[in-house]
Amino acid sequence: QKEVEQDPGPLSVPEGAIVSLNCTYSNSAFQYFMWYRQYSRKGPELLMYTYSSGNKEDGRFTAQVDKSSKYISLFIRDSQPSDSATYLCAMTTGTGNQFYFGTGTSLTVIP
Amino acid sequence: DADVTQTPRNRITKTGKRIMLECSQTKGHDRMYWYRQDPGLGLRLIYYSFDVKDINKGEISDGYSVSRQAQAKFSLSLESAIPNQTALYFCATSDLGAFSYNEQFFGPGTRLTVL
């Protein structure tokens, strides 16, 4: 079983839609949960991170972590064409030794 | 200038050839990482280094070796390249801060094709 599971998509939505991206994981020791955004032919860039369970909001983006279900989500409100990218979830136990990444979900926002 | 640079950006080589991918950073970070990215498999850790004298194997180190020449430089070698090493390779860095979690900063990637 993979440490982190993520639906690869692709996901295609109209501009202005609410987007929901999700990951599940198996290791209950994970404490830090990240979402990276990767544009075509670029390296991943950190979008948001949360510690333990709960919600975190940053502009149009909201990250949710439910440790009891081992489930994390990223919501994008009022999606824009510039949001078109691959979104990768990542998590770590907090020792800083290793990040575990999902496979990434490819998102296209159609104008 | 980019904080994390990788050379080359693209490379096509033949089976059995020795290949070196190089990574340099100007962020002053102690920790450096090499990942490969494959469709459907995501990012997988090959090797990581917490300082110049520290080298650690990651999830998929077989067929690879690394060298940490300086705090700012971390190179990845494929001693005898094989076609299933065709992938996108990323270098990343992170700092040793006050908290256990530290953001990783990625380079632009090297696209390697082994024929």
Image (spheres, coloured by chain):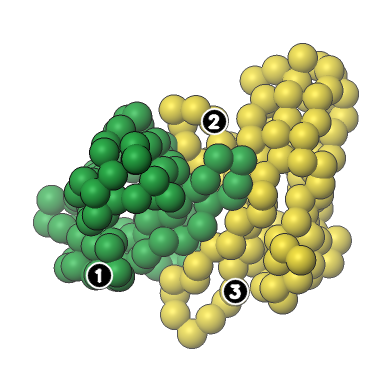
Chain under disc 3: B
Distance CA(mark 2)–CA(mark 1): 30 Å
> Which quadrant: the C terminus of chain A?
top left
Chain B painted colour: yellow
Give SS at disc 1.
Answer: strand
How many labels, in total? 3
Chain represented in green: A
Side (left or right) of B47 relative to A86: right
Q: Residue furthest left?
A: A68
Look at the image and tell me whether residue B38 can be seen: yes
Q: Residue at x 70, y 17 (%)?
A: B83
* Quarter of the figure with the N terminus of chain A: top left
Residue pictured at 58% horizontal, 62% vertical: B105
The residue singled out by tag 2 in the image is B38
Q: Position of residue A13 (x, y in %)?
A: 27, 37
Label 2, secondary structure: give it.
Answer: strand
Residue depth check, mark 1 versus mark 3: number of the one nearer the observer = 1
Query: Residue at 70% across / 34% down in the picture?
Result: B111
What's under tag 1, amino acid-wise?
Glu
- Which residue position is annotated with label 1? A57
Quick check: marks 1 and 3 in contact, CB under 8 Å?
no
Answer with the quarter of the image where residue B16 lies.
top right
Residue placed under numbered mark 3 in the picture:
B95
